[in-house]
């Protein structure tokens, strides 16, 4: 198991390097000059040139990238052009709320999706099966921003049941719990459908397997047959989908945090891009990309835990 984990970690290194290179090059093709942004519209050419030299923007691109990677290896993500605050400090303040939001979205959407998919598979072809699949398709089709705006208008504005702007506190406080409900429903709502559909397909196949028929022939209770023998063997493709969808949740978190003014990494990334704060934008890209890589690494390790053949 340890060897399998080390192999996956080594494979993640070139991926992260590619992300760093692409993110750096994307910042280079943006027409806005970071030195001009920092100096302000009234600055003279001499001041702009001095700031470019201070930021190292007058060096060749290959040297800029080398210095950028060297600073990253030392833990230096740079300083924000707009507010002159270390990027690592801003990211440290926003990673917590983003993780809270993702956790709150996953803690209800994954169990619900697996439960709905299992029920639909067990009652395959019934009215309940068609209802679950219809709800799943609707969940996949609804964009994140539409669901968020709908919840804001109905639950937050019309009915005034829950707050819909900002983060009122940590997740373990009552105010923080109320504030995170609507963003968590918005972010997790588009997660239930894919998980339910994949679970249904996998469980339908597992229920037709030989070992499931053998378990039934031995007289095991139907619930135990479904949970222990069918669902467990059907979890590998479901875990695959969950891992990919959790990665896409990082993109959905950008939209959700912007809609609900949630102080997370996604909202920070949007603000940095709109204000041409290149160091901050690059820092958020690194964090989001590293999160995606870590999620896929965890999924690979779960493969080995669920199916020892994957470690071979």
Image: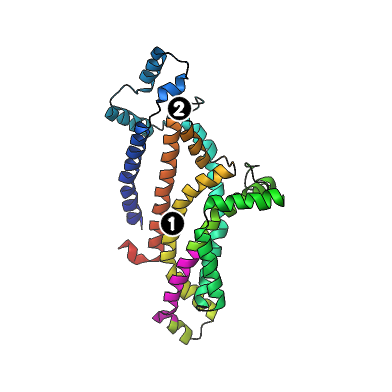
For residue 172, side relative to residue 292 (left or right): right
Residue 38: % across, % down: 46, 22
At x 38% / y 57%, what residue is drawn?
300
Q: Is residue 268 magenta?
A: no
User: Visible in this render: residue 12?
Assistant: yes
Q: Which residues are magenta?
A: 195-212
Q: Which mark is residue 79?
A: 2
Of pointers 2 and 1, the one earlier in the residue sequence? 2
Q: Residues within 10 Å of mark 2 (few under 14, many from 20)?
A: many
Residue 227: % across, % down: 51, 73
Against 236, residue 73 (above or below) is: above
At x 54% / y 77%, what residue is drawn?
223
At x 56% / y 71%, what residue is drawn?
131
Residue on which disc 1 sits: 243
Residue 204: % across, % down: 45, 75
Between the C-alphas of marks 2 and 1, the distance is: 33 Å
Q: Of helix, strand and loop, which one carries label 1?
A: helix
**In this view of the protein, which residue sits in the foreground, 253 or 283?**
253
Against 34, residue 170 (above or below) is: below
């Amino acid at each position: 198991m340890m060897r399998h984990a080390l192999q996956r970690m080594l494979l993640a290194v070139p991926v992260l390097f590619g992300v760093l290179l692409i993110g750096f090059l994307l910042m280079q093709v943006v027409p806005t000059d970071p030195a001009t942004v920092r100096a302000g519209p009234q600055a003279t050419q001499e001041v702009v040139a001095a700031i470019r030299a201070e930021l190292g923007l007058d060096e060749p691109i290959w040297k800029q990238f080398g210095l950028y990677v060297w600073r990253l290896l030392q833990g230096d993500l740079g300083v924000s052009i707009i507010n002159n605050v270390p990027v690592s400090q801003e990211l440290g303040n926003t990673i917590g709320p983003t993780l809270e939001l993702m956790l709150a979205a996953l803690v209800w959407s994954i169990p619900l999706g697996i439960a709905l998919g299992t029920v639909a598979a067990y009652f395959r072809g019934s009215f309940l099966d068609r209802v679950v699949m219809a709800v799943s398709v609707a969940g996949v089709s609804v964009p994140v921003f539409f669901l968020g705006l709908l919840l804001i208008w109905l639950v937050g504005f019309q009915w005034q049941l829950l707050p819909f702007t900002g983060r009122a506190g940590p997740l373990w406080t009552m105010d923080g719990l109320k504030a995170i409900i609507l963003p968590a429903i918005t972010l997790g709502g588009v997660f239930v459908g894919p998980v339910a559909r994949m679970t249904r397909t996998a469980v339908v196949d597992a229920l037709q397997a030989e070992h499931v028929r053998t378990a039934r022939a031995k007289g095991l209770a139907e619930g135990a047959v479904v949970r222990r023998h069918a669902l467990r063997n059907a979890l590998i493709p479901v875990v695959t989908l969950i891992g990919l969808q959790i990665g896409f949740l990082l993109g959905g978190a950008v939209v959700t945090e912007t809609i609900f003014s949630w102080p997370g990494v996604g909202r920070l990334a949007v603000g940095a891009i709109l204000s041409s704060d290149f160091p901050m934008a690059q820092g958020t890209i690194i964090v989001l990309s590293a999160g995606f890589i870590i999620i896929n690494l965890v999924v690979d390790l779960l493969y080995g835990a669920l199916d020892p053949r994957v470690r071979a």
